[in-house]
């Protein structure tokens, strides 16, 4: 993956890993744990919550890891835009910086939603709460936490594709300018 050349493989990997993270986030939302209020057999005044499967936590962590691997792959390929040759000035560099910052912002929001949803879902699944109040409902993860993560996964994917596309353009520009500067007019030396 040479500098300055946009790689189709990188585009495909970014899209596939992001869509996998999106799928895991949607699956996590559909499989959120829900609780049932159960009355204690020995003491009918005590009720507690029993939660069903903890699979949504695993899906949420899976989405987190796939999105993280997408971002890590792109940052390694582009050298996080900080290392390597400097970017050539111009509008492509400006768009590269805008897409870089925007993709990191949406990435952090998506990761926050996914890990917070997984954490809260796991918390409700692991513990039983003793309740002394009638007509009580079991607390569960709010609807939409994983969906918000999934939406930001898609935003991150789109911004990452544009970031890589403009990064490749600006590296092609700097490569062409380097070649032009190195080719000079031959001047004979003084004797």
Image: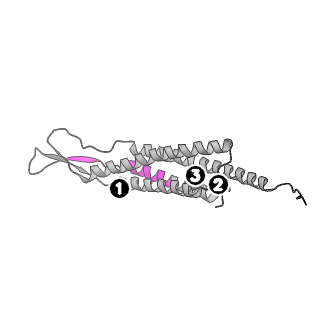
The nearer-to-camera label among 1 and 2 is: 2
Q: Position of residue 71 (x, y in %)?
A: 51, 53
User: Which residue extends farthest front?
Assistant: 191
Earlier-in-chain disc, 1 versus 2: 1
Residue 119 position in % (x across, y down): 33, 50
Disc 3 from disc 1: Cα separation: 39 Å
Structural crowding at the residue carrying mark 1, measured as other residues with C-alpha within 10 Å and reported as few (<14), some (14–19) or many (≥20): some
Q: Quadrant of residue 101?
A: top right
For the point 13% across and 49% down, the residue is 40
| Image point (23%, 41%), residue name | 137
Element type at mark 3: loop
Secondary structure beneath disc 1? helix
In the rendered image of this protein, does residue 151 appear above or below residue 16? above
Residue drawn at the location 43% of the way across and 49% of the way down:
111
Residue to which mark 3 is pinned: 82
**Label 3 neighbourhood size at 10 Å, few (<14), some (14-19), many (20+)?**
few
Residue in front for this viewpoint, 135 or 156: 156
- Taking the magenta stretch, the answer to whether it contains residue 179 is no
Quarter holding the N terminus is bottom right
Residues shaded magenta: 19-41
Q: Which residue is mark 1?
A: 55
In the rendered structure, find residue 161 and report the number of the disc placed on it.
none
Q: Describe residue 56's horizontal placement relative to residue 151 as left or right.
A: left
- The coloring applied to the image is one colour
Depth check, mark 3 against mark 1: the one in front is 3
Tell whether position 22 is magenta. yes
In this view, the residue in front, 127 or 164, is: 164
Q: Toward the viewer: 15 or 40?
A: 15
Q: How many residues crowd mark 2 within 10 Å: few (<14), some (14–19), many (20+)?
A: few
Q: Which mark is drawn over residue 85? A: 2
The tag earlier along the polypeptide, 3 or 1, is 1
């Amino acid at each position: 993956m040479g500098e300055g050349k946009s790689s189709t493989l990188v585009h495909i990997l970014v899209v596939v890993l992001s869509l996998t993270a999106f799928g895991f986030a949607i699956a996590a939302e559909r499989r959120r744990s829900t609780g049932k209020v159960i009355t204690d057999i020995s003491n009918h005044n005590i009720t507690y919550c029993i939660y069903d499967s903890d699979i949504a936590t695993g899906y949420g962590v899976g989405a987190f890891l796939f999105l993280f691997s997408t971002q890590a792959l792109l940052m390694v390929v582009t050298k996080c835009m900080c290392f390597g040759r400097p970017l050539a000035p111009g509008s492509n560099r400006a768009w590269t910086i805008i897409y870089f910052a925007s993709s990191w912002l949406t990435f952090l929001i998506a990761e926050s939603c996914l890990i917070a949803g997984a954490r809260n879902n796991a918390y409700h699944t692991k513990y039983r709460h003793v309740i002394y109040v009638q007509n009580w409902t079991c607390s569960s993860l709010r609807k939409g936490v994983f969906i918000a993560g999934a939406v930001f996964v898609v935003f991150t994917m789109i911004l990452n594709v544009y970031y890589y596309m403009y990064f490749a353009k600006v590296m092609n520009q700097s490569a062409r300018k380097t070649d032009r500067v190195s080719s000079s007019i031959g001047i004979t030396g003084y004797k």
